[in-house]
Image (cartoon, rainbow, N blue to C red):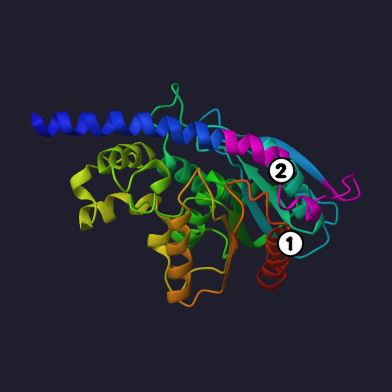
């Protein structure tokens, strides 16, 4: 009975902290719609001579299982690269339509681009979590490939990308699911997405001092029954691995561009250091860009924003052609 009560307490803590996490992420998502560190480089003059957009194409049975597809006007190439960009919103908000600007920019560069919606955690969808969302993204890729083919665009490679929550989901596909992808994954880029879940890193929520709260929130995020006494054990590593991108990095992982704010109050900046360390240890080509004066919105470091933009260009050219 005591164990059951502890689990209940853990989940209650988790829901309380998840509420704070969700509120912070939702606010950051709204902020990022007003400020975009890629704004200077992702403005495309869009018209029928550049490309065409097909919206709300289904890939599953859920109401959120839709994607938008952006295809170049030039359909004469033998094959195209696909870039999937996943929206921010704290796993609880946001929509693919909010990334129209960067998707049009990618399409203007000659890629087929896709924005994908996924089932958001809410009162109506309490069983949605980071893992179920990542599996929906995985499910969407064959549908995107098939629709592009139906429109006359053969795809032969892909990149994953996203912002905030979308960055997390992009990393999970790029590191965890690349081996089973119907298209070769060549790279991943994105900003401020949580990459792993160690309570000592999540000081922004006080989890380094309150393991019960950490267990509850990480339970909500993963869909696993995590307790405070599991931290530091193999059982915890196994339970959290399915949503921890860092855990999947090895010498075969794809080249990576990532950006993080040193003063992020929404997700754990310290966790991003583990991402950099894992990529470095396994010899994965990557650019880990820290915005030293910025928070989750990456708003206070113009020089670093330019570097982030340049690295995305560089890696797209080098690995996506």
Q: Which mark is residue 288?
A: none
Q: Is residue 304 left or right of residue 260?
A: right
Q: Residues within 10 Å of mark 2 (few under 14, many from 20)?
A: some
Which of disc 2 and disc 1 is earlier in sequence? 2
Q: Which residue is rendered at x = 75% and y = 54% of the image?
A: 106
- Residue named by callout 1: 306
Q: Quadrant of residue 33 in the image?
A: top right
Whether residue 49 is in magenta: the answer is yes
Say how many tags the image has. 2
Please provide percent x and percent y for residue 246: 42, 61
- Residue named by callout 2: 35
Please provide percent x and percent y for residue 188: 58, 61
Q: Is residue 131 left or right of residue 292?
A: left
Helix, strand or loop at label 2? It is loop
Residue 66 visible: no
Helix, strand or loop at label 1? It is helix
Residue 116 visible: yes
Whether residue 279 is in magenta: the answer is no
Q: Is residue 212 shown above or below 107?
A: above
Q: Is residue 194 shown above or below 290?
A: above
Q: Which residue is rendered at x = 47% and y = 50% of the image?
A: 194
Please provide percent x and percent y for residue 29: 61, 38
Question: What quarter of the picture does the C terminus occupy?
Answer: bottom right
**Magenta span of residues:** 27-51
């Amino acid at each position: 009975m005591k164990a059951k009560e502890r689990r209940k307490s853990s989940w209650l803590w988790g829901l309380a902290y998840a509420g704070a996490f969700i509120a912070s992420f939702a606010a950051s998502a709204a902020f990022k719609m007003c400020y975009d560190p890629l704004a200077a480089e992702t403005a495309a003059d869009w018209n029928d001579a550049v490309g065409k957009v097909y919206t709300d194409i289904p890939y599953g049975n859920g109401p959120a299982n839709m994607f938008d597809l952006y295809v170049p006007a030039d359909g004469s190439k033998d094959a195209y690269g696909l870039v999937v960009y996943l929206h921010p919103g704290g796993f609880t908000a946001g929509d693919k339509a909010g990334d129209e600007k960067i998707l049009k920019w990618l399409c203007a560069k000659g890629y087929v681009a896709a924005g994908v919606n996924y089932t958001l955690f809410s009162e109506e969808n309490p069983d949605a979590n980071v893992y179920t969302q990542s599996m929906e993204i995985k499910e969407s890729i064959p549908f995107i490939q098939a629709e592009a083919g139906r429109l006359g665009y053969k795809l032969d490679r892909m990149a994953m990308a996203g912002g905030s929550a979308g960055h997390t989901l992009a990393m999970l596909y790029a590191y965890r699911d690349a081996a089973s992808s119907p298209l070769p994954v060549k790279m991943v880029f994105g900003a401020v997405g949580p990459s792993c879940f160690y309570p000592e890193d999540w000081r922004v929520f006080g989890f380094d001092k309150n393991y019960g709260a950490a267990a509850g929130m990480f339970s909500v995020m993963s869909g696993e029954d995590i307790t405070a006494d599991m931290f530091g054990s193999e059982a915890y590593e196994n339970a959290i691995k399915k949503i921890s991108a860092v855990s999947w990095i090895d010498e075969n992982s794809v080249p990576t561009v990532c950006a993080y704010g040193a003063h992020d109050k929404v997700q754990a900046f310290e966790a991003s250091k583990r991402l950099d360390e894992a990529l470095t240890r396994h010899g994965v080509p990557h650019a880990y860009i820290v915005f030293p004066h910025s928070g989750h919105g990456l708003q206070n470091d113009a020089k670093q924003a330019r570097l982030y933009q340049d690295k995305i260009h560089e890696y797209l050219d080098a690995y996506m052609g």
